[in-house]
């Protein structure tokens, strides 16, 4: 390990599909700056959220734990961890820790703006955030709150506003290496406007653009929303470029680990009544790209990884011990191509829209649902019923649900046992999963 540890910067977007990124196959050239980073660094080709909704996914990243373990299994709960979040670990190792943007991990009853210190999960040095940025700001009117609750109002497009604050942070003198997360709201929709909002002039650039194949067969609202969604992502990439230029001008680009990821994807109301909270690729598959010391391998990792693996990986990268409480695993064995002990599957917990569990293997997606539970009130169930089964080799856009078909009974039974093993490992209980009877 080098004497001086590298800085770590997490560039965190909200509700961004993996296939909007050029390196993952987007034909729109939305992300030229990210694509350059990706070609030099590590691209995780099959990266997934463990909980496709905002607050639980964020807590998974910070704790390296699954939602039923860290306790934020739906939106609205607070994360009050004592000493084992990423921020705590980096702070103990001598890092300056900072957070800018959307938080979403303070209890709803404390309000959408100021976040008390006990709910900042260890980010004690630099803090400019709002618990629910979508309720304290609008696309051209940004309000953040400082360490002591002071209002920070910034004019201009919201993505630009947060980027301004990141650049200001980087340009400050730092006596220690820093660990900084910038958490953008975009391309998440603006809740009270019920729409995605691109910067002025960007919607027009992407009208009548490429339509992802998984959306084309369903109504949803993608026809109206995609141009703004793409415009948001284009501006995010431009702002990433500005941050990279700032790191270079400060002479610290080569000494900084840069992580690009999102909390979950977006299916534009094609799979349920809103934008996520389903087991489909459009909901759970995310971009994950890491560049910097230890990661500049020009490598694409084909194995499945997930958000709970991010924390142990970053701690491993800078030589900090991983707390035993973290359930994810460092990805460094995959980077070194030591794959023999890697369990090539991802466990997903789904709340709010329903109480569901899913397992994603290299080929299959298997999802079960608790039919008598409320996704807002219940975190888990004793009984689930088979709900969805997709063969991702034959049906990558998940258009044909195979659950309950007798010719897939053997594979369903195999996946059922895998899923039950994961539930027992993570949640400490082994529920029943009832077979789905075939339906046309």
Image (cartoon, rainbow, N blue to C red):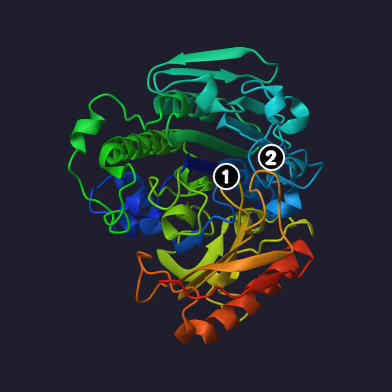
- Residue 243, relative to residue 379: is it above or below? above
Task: Estimate how packed mark 1 is, as few (under 14), some (14 to 19) or many (20 or more) residues with alpha carbons within 10 Å.
Answer: many
What residue is drawn where x is 46% and y is 53%?
A: 283
Q: Are marks 2 and 1 in contact (CB under 8 Å)?
A: yes
Res. 374 visible in picture: yes
Report which quarter residue 155 is drawn in.
top left
- Residue 397, relative to residue 402: is it above or below? above
The C terminus lies in quadrant: bottom left
Left or right? Give the position of 339 relative to 432. Answer: left
Left or right? Give the position of 74 relative to 11. Answer: right
Task: Estimate how packed mark 2 is, as few (under 14), some (14 to 19) or many (20 or more) residues with alpha carbons within 10 Å.
Answer: many
Q: Which mark is residue 8?
A: 1
273 vs 118, nearest the viewer: 273
Left or right? Give the position of 65 relative to 167. Answer: right
- Residue 395, relative to residue 243: is it above or below? below
Report which quarter residue 421 is drawn in.
bottom right
Q: Earlier in the sequence, mark 2 or mark 1?
A: 1
Q: Residue 150 location, x and y as percent?
A: 64, 12
Cα–Cα gap, marks 2 and 1: 9 Å
What residue is drawn where x is 68% and y is 52%?
A: 67
What residue is drawn where x is 44% and y is 21%?
A: 138
The N terminus lies in quadrant: bottom right
Q: Which mark is residue 95?
A: 2
Q: Secondary structure at mark 2?
A: loop
């Amino acid at each position: 390990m080098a004497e001086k540890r590298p800085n770590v910067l997490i560039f965190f977007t909200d509700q961004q599909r993996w296939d909007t990124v050029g390196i993952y196959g987007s034909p729109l050239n939305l992300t030229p700056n990210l694509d350059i980073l990706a070609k030099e660094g590590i691209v995780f080709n099959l990266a997934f959220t463990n909980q496709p909704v905002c607050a639980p996914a964020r807590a998974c990243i910070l704790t390296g734990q699954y939602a039923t373990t860290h306790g934020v299994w739906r939106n609205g709960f607070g994360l009050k961890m004592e000493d084992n979040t990423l921020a705590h670990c980096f702070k103990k190792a001598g890092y300056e820790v900072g957070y800018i943007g959307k938080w979403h991990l303070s209890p709803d009853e404390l309000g959408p703006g100021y976040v008390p210190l006990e709910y900042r999960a260890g980010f004690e040095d630099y803090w400019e955030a709002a618990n629910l940025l979508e309720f304290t700001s609008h696309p051209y009117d940004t309000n953040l709150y400082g360490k002591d609750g002071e209002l920070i109002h910034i004019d201009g497009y919201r993505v630009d506003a947060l980027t301004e604050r990141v650049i200001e942070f980087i340009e400050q003198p730092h006596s220690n290496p820093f660990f900084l997360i910038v958490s953008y709201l975009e391309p998440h929709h603006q809740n009270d406007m019920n729409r995605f909002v691109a910067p002025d002039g960007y919607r027009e650039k992407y009208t009548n653009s490429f339509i992802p194949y998984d959306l084309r067969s369903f109504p949803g609202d993608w026809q109206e929303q995609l141009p703004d969604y793409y415009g948001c992502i284009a501006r995010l990439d431009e702002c990433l470029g500005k941050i990279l230029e700032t790191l270079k001008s400060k002479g610290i680009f080569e000494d900084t680990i840069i992580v690009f990821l999102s909390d979950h994807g977006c299916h534009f109301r094609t799979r349920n009544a809103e934008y996520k909270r389903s087991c489909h690729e459009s909901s759970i598959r995310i971009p994950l790209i890491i560049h910097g010391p230890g990661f500049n391998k020009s490598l694409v990792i084909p194995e499945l990884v997930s958000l709970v693996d991010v924390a142990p990986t970053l701690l491993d990268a800078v030589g900090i011990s991983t707390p035993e409480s973290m359930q994810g695993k460092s990805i460094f064995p995959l980077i070194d191509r030591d794959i023999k002990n890697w369990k090539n599957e991802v466990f997903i917990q789904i709340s709010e829209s329903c109480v569901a569990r899913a397992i994603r293997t290299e080929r299959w997606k298997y999802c079960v649902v608790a039919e008598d539970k409320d996704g807002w009130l219940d975190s888990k169930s004793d009984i689930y019923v088979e709900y969805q089964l997709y063969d991702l080799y034959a049906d990558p856009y998940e258009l044909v649900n195979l659950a309950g078909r007798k010719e897939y009974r053997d594979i369903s039974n195999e996946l059922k046992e895998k899923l039950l093993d994961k539930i027992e490992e993570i949640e400490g209980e082994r529920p029943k999963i009832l077979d789905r009877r075939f339906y046309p």
